[in-house]
Amino acid sequence: MEDRKSAEYLALRDEVQRNLAAQKEWSIFTITITVTILGFAINAEDGYSAELCLLPFIILVTAATKMRNYKSSISKIVAYMMVRHESPDGFFWETCLNKYRAKQSKFVSIIGVLETQEFFLTGLLCMLLSIHYSAGQCELFGINKIVIYFLACILLLYIILVTQNYWNMEPTEVEDEYEKWKSIIGEGNDQKSK
């Protein structure tokens, strides 16, 4: 029984590591694609620079949503590990780490903001470059530009909402998931004893 429990714990730790690696890959992919598109936009000579600068929003919204799902999955796994596998005389890493993060989360650094708001900041850069090129082409106030910039603002707002509390294993999210798992596992134990 103990071997199965250890194997499950290690498999869950491995899943957390895979999610962390996938986050890094998505981040690098998204920034690379965005920079490539902006490079084409800056060098475009046919008047489409402003529109090309907004094209990265497609990948930014997708990536922000995907990253949020990875982070949520990590919190669920960590909370499950805390409920199912941790005790003061055994594994206790996740519980201690969550307490540590709760104390440290009060100190938001500029690097932390840059790490967690990369998609918002990238989208803002794309929008500002688009406005710059539209102003240079004297096309800033056409109805289609106003609609496009309004939609870009909505997408930026969506990215902000999706990426708020974006930290991996954010303490309050882990605590919420912990309580859910605790009630689920408790219900399962009650049914087994009947």
Image (spheres, rainbow, N blue to C red):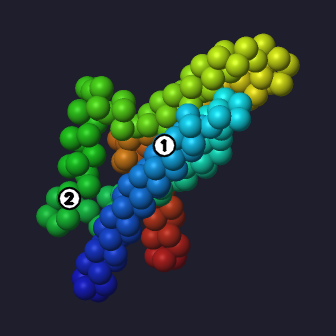
- Compared to residue 84, the image places residue 182 above or below, namely above
Looking at the image, do the residues carrying marks 1 and 2 touch, with CB atoms under 8 Å apart?
no
**Secondary structure beneath label 2:** loop
Side (left or right) of 21 relative to 145: left
Q: Quadrant of residue 132?
A: top right
Q: CA distance from mark 1 to mark 2?
A: 42 Å
- Compared to residue 147, the image places residue 16 above or below, namely below
Residue in the picture at 14% in, 64% down:
89
Q: Which residue is mark 1?
A: 35
- Compared to residue 191, the image places residue 49 above or below, namely above
Q: Which mark is residue 92?
A: 2
The label nearer to you, 1 versus 2, is 1
Q: Neighbour class for label 1 at 10 Å: few (<14), some, many (≥20)?
A: some
Residue in the picture at 20% in, 57% down:
93
Q: Which mark is residue 62?
A: none
Circle 2: residue type: Phe
- Is residue 126 among what the camera can see? yes
Circle 1: residue type: Val
- Compared to residue 141, the image places residue 117 above or below, namely below
